[in-house]
Image: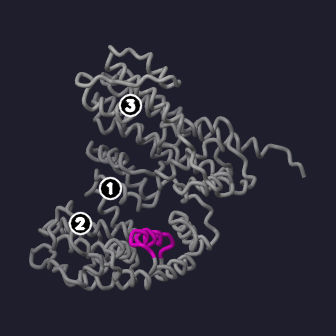
Amino acid sequence: MTWQNLVTCALLGTERQAPEWPAGDDALGQLLSRLDADDREGALLRAAGVMALWRRAGHLLVHDPRPLPPPCEADDAPDCGPLARQHLALMLQGHHAEFLLEWLKTLSVAGRRAPADLLPALLEAGAARIGLRPALLPVLGQRGRWLAQQNPAWGYAVQADDENLWQTGQFEERLALLRQSRATRPDRALELLSATWAEERAKQRREFIEALAEGLSMADEPFLEAALDDRSIEVTHAAAELLARLPESRLVQRLTARALQGVRFQPGRFFKHDRLEVELPEDDPALRRDGIADPPSSVKLGEKAWRLSRMVGAIPPALWSQQWGRAPAEILTVSRESEWRPALLEGWALATQRHRDPDWAEALLPLYPDHDTLTAALAELLPPARFESYLLGLLGDASTGGRAAALVLLSRVQRPWTVALGRAVLGQVRQRVCEDKQPDWWLSNALRGFARWLPPELSEEAAAGWPTEAKQWPQWQKAVNDLLDRLRFRRAMREAIAAEESAQSDLPSLE
């Protein structure tokens, strides 16, 4: 009986074809002969299990004729302790996994490395989550980097300080080399890429271009300007995206000249309000070269309005304030009367992110208090003190709308809070419980997320003062307990690493 016979029987159904197997004197045949033929379904499943195990046990390992790699060098940094290892193991298994990035950063600051037995799982996590990599690489140690050399999927973690890899390495190794070089020697990284640019595949060219975002400067502008003529649309768009972040680039200058002609400010006179006059751009080869082609199918704007938003999105938003003598909030108010306001808003929001303008970010935030991506992106542009001041202003607002807006905003933004902000947020949530308000579904979920940003030292303070006698407390209790459990876990994992660091520093010197 072959595996294919089993598959055929399963597809046809045991009511149409009974499973059969030939008698045999070998171990497999003897085991199959003991199955109950009257129980067709059971016999089929048991036979499948037996044969699957038999096939797996008989699988021959692939012979690799290459010599074994040289052994790993010894690590200088001390390993993390057993308690910190337990915390890491839990997170890698999916428990409190949202704190893994913080654990890695805390371990790196302490000058320690990840435990050897969990390195494969950590490298897998880094392969799946690009955002982990900057914090993961410093704690891998020599053994982690040695392991990364043995698996192409872990090539991002290879110590890419040998420029020969640019000519001989796999794509992941070359990309890692380019990224690491951009962090320390951006000009040299650009030289390496320029030397082989004509030979690179289109998909790889796009990823190499995107890697130039690290250390981006006007020194990259000639190379990126030339990349606008690449035969791949993806490469062109990637180059245009980076050029749009350079205020002095030729691309920004070209689009600025066109946008200033197409969007004009008309000051009000004789009881008339200020207004904007907009002339939508037509499609042409020059715009397509600058990365403004056909809109994606998901875009709700029309083609011309979308082109307008892309043009505006490349211009430093402070330019509009300089040209028109109006603050960002005033310009946004004037745009209310324009039928093309959605396109203008989309362009200003994009430009604010590209050029990292905090004034425009603060003016736009009230318009995007609960957006999937823009809320967090705009809030990230505010310096910590300014962001906290903005939120505390909302939380101190006498209207419930302002306080609710602050909580919604905090549910979107991923950045640590100060003690003052943490106390204000906890006080606001307690107040909502006292007012006998049922928890909104988003706030229940947000409470669990708040544990990631509250200062861990507030864990005990956060556990006190809850109005457990309130009518709606049973509906809040689980979300609050989840918040406290997560906050205590964060505190414990940070204290475990700090205690190990302290113990290491207290050891007597051997010198």
Along the polypeptide, which appears first: circle 1 or circle 2?
2
Tally of numbered tags: 3
Closer to the camera: disc 1 or disc 3?
A: 1
Q: Secondary structure at mark 2?
A: helix
Q: Which residue lies under the disc numbered 3?
A: 479
Q: Which residue lies under the disc numbered 1?
A: 373
Q: Residue at x 53, y 40 (%)?
A: 59
Location of residue 359 with respect to 120 vertically, above or below: below
Location of residue 459 with respect to 379 vertically, above or below: above
Give the crowd class for mark 1: few <14, some 14-19, many >=20 residues within 10 Å.
few
* Foreground of the two, 502 or 322: 502
What range is drawn magenta here? 200-216
Q: Secondary structure at mark 1?
A: loop
The x, y position of residue 449, in whole percent, is 41, 41
Res. 345 mark? 2
Q: Quadrant of the N terminus?
A: top left
Q: Residue at x 35, y 28 (%)?
A: 476
Work out which residue is located at the far right of the displayed protein and give it.
Answer: 511
* Foreground of the two, 12 or 243: 12
Amino acid marked by disc 3? Ala
| 3D distance between C-alphas at marks 1 and 2 | 14 Å
Residue 279, quarter of picture: bottom left
Res. 262 mark? none
Closer to the camera: disc 1 or disc 2?
A: 1
The answer to whether the residue labelled 1 contacts the one labelled 3, judged by CB atoms less than 8 Å apart, is no
* Foreground of the two, 295 or 127: 127
